[in-house]
Image: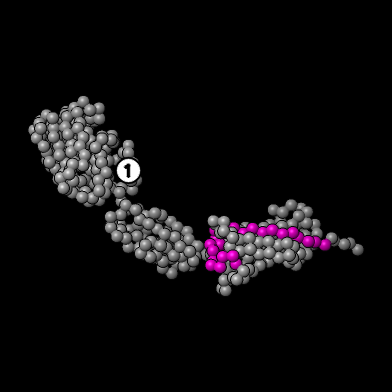
Amino acid sequence: MKNLRKKFACLFLAFLFFAISASAGPVCVNARVTAILEPETSTEYAQAGVPVIRDFTVQAPCQAAFAVAVETPVGFTLTLYNSAGVELDSTHFTASDPDWLPLNDIYFNDCTIELPAGDYKAELIFDESAAYQFAIIGNEPEATLSSHALTITAGFDKTLSVSDNSGSIQWTSSKPSVASVNSKGKVSAKKAGKCTITASVDGKKLKCTVTVQSNKYTAAKLTNSQIPNGSASWEAFSAFYDAKGNLVIKCRMVNNSGHYSEYLKDLSIKVKTADKKTAAVYKASKKNLYVSDQGYKDFKITISKDSLKIKKPVDLRNASVTTDGKYGYTYYSYQ
């Protein structure tokens, strides 16, 4: 066990009882500091060369800090054994060790080691007789939920997980009709709304707010102010599946061409998933569409379920819809 310097928040029980507040090494952010072994009395005495043995138990995997407080720096050896008596680690501290930290009228030195749950034995042997205190503090990770807020499209799912837990997890949903959850943390979105998914573990209730949104593509509707004079354009502003599984796409044509638009030609619509897979394609050579100059018109195109590239509904809320095509017009005639 090599000494790793720490900053400690100190609690006094005669000489010293301390807790880890920060570490130079990596420590789980969501953790609790617990006393694994407290000093036996206000002042303990050790004879030079005579082992001092302390048995202790680690309830959950943790980063354990071993600290010795003395009136003046003194050399000592700290050895750690497992329950079978096998030596796990050993460190010798000298009286001149630069890591001795003065605090009020005492000095303390410490070292840390990652320990799994189990029974252990710590052995202290001082080079000289000394008054001392010995304590072990654990920085135990607490169970954490992978997310505290999720937005899911109806008909789809996401999986929550719990880390640093020591016990089994019980999953529940406050509104199963909105989103259900199974024993493995898989959240299945049912219909638009909100609910809370709770993971009960290690005596805690970890909560995640789930927002379910309809499986619908939406975009801002095209306006005349977006189209330069002498031009016309059209875009999709909505897409959804009807009751039969057909894909319905709503579009808007905006005409600033200076002429009465009569039709669209060489129409093309592509629907792609968030991971760029083509879900649907629509093509047509011509579509009659009368739109006056400086006007607009909404229309819809339906792609049958049989014509879809991906038969199973895709997440339209996170999809992209692109359109292409030219418009045809008739010159105004004046009598």
Question: Which residue is at a point 25% across and 45% down the rendered structure image?
Answer: 115
Question: Which residue is at a point 23% across and 30% down the rendered structure image?
Answer: 100
* Image location (x, y in percent) of residue 324: 69, 58
Front residue of this view, candidates 240 and 55: 55
* Image location (x, y in percent) of residue 161: 37, 57
Task: Using the rendered view, name the quadrant where residue 320 is placed.
Answer: bottom right
* Quadrant of image for the N terminus: top left
Say if 94 sits above or below 209 in the image.
above
Say if 56 sits above or below 316 in the image.
above
Say if 322 sits above or below 67 in the image.
below
* Quadrant of image for the C terminus: bottom right
- Which residue is the extreme one toward the bottom? 244
- Residue 204 visible, this angle: yes
Residue 104 covered by magenta stretch: no
Question: Which residue is at a point 66% across and 67% down the rendered structure image?
Answer: 301
Magenta span: 308-330
Q: How is the image coloured?
A: one colour
Task: Using the rendered view, name the quadrant where residue 47 is placed.
Answer: top left
Counting labels gives 1
Type of amino acid under label 1? Val
User: Which residue has dot 1 on it?
Assistant: 27
- Residue 296 visible, this angle: no
- Which residue is the extreme one toward the top? 96
* Image location (x, y in percent) of residue 134: 17, 38
Residue neighbourhood size for the residue with mark 1, other residues' Cα within 10 Å, grouped as few (<14), some (14–19), many (≥20):
some
Task: Using the rendered view, name the quadrant where residue 48 is placed.
Answer: top left
